[in-house]
Image (cartoon, rainbow, N blue to C red):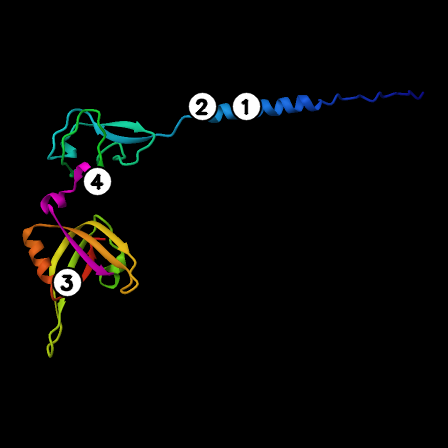
Amino acid sequence: MAVGVHLRSLSIPRPDTRTLLGVGLAAVAALLVLWMTRPVPTVPVLVAGSDLPSGTPLVELDLTVRNATDPAGLVVGDEPGELSDWVLVAPIAAGEPLLPSLLRSPEVQAAPDLLALELDGAHAVLGRIDPGDRVDIYASTSRPGEPAETRLVASSVFVVDATVSDSSVNGDQIQLLLAVDDALAASLTAAMNGSDLDLVRVGG
């Protein structure tokens, strides 16, 4: 015997536009709250753990770490690392951050004077010299009727600063500040007068 089954059509209520808009606004508001309350990223920087004297390498000083949201102009890191042998040149009070301008490298401590040297890029490693590099300096002299003579004037000279500028006449010009003592300054000054200088970047 056949059984007849009658199915009723079910009607699913549709949410009205105001409901959908409310849900959307609630979701946006939740995202805004999450974004505004998100933790601000911080970077560790070195600060003085106590009153620090000048003339002392960082590795011997009482340093601590503070998290900063804006580390610009500060010494970033949670330990001195490569700066361990650098010397604090001015005293700072406990809690004050270390500043790069207050630090001197061992090379500058050993040769505390600065000598400016400007060369065109062809004689200065095409400008591929950065602060912290070391350079050998050669001087070439030529006299009429005699073969050119090249000699090593100074070796492993520490570069304190290096700047590349454009010149319409000679191409790229390299301005360097070199760490020197009295003897080295005299040798380089003499070589700069009457000789052509060339730099060789060493150690890297």
Is 106 or 184 nearer to us in this picture?
184
Displayed quadrant of residue 103: top left
Q: Are marks 1 and 3 in contact (CB under 8 Å)?
A: no
Q: Residue at x 8, y 61 (%)?
A: 190
Q: Which residue is mark 3?
A: 138
Is 3 or 26 nearer to us in this picture?
26
Counting residues from the start of the chain, the first of labels 4 and 3 encountered is: 4
As drawn, which residue projects farthest toward the left?
183
Q: Is disc 1 surrounded by few (<14), some (14 to 19) or many (20+) residues within 10 Å? A: few
Q: Which residue is mark 4?
A: 82
For label 3, the SS is: strand
Q: Residue 166 at x, y = what percent?
A: 30, 58
Q: Is disc 4 surrounded by few (<14), some (14 to 19) or many (20+) residues within 10 Å? A: few
Q: Compute the Cα span from label 4 to label 3.
A: 30 Å
For label 4, the SS is: helix
Q: Which mark is residue 29?
A: 1
Residue type at the position of mark 4: Glu
Identify whether 50 is placed above or below 124.
Answer: above
Residue type at the position of mark 3: Tyr
Displayed quadrant of residue 61: top left
Q: Compute the Cα span from label 1 to label 3.
A: 68 Å
**Of circles 1 and 4, which is in front?**
1
The residue range painted magenta reads: 101-120
For label 2, the SS is: loop
Q: Compute the Cα span from label 1 to label 2.
A: 12 Å
Q: Which residue is mark 2?
A: 37
Residue 51 drawn in magenta: no
Residue type at the position of mark 1: Ala
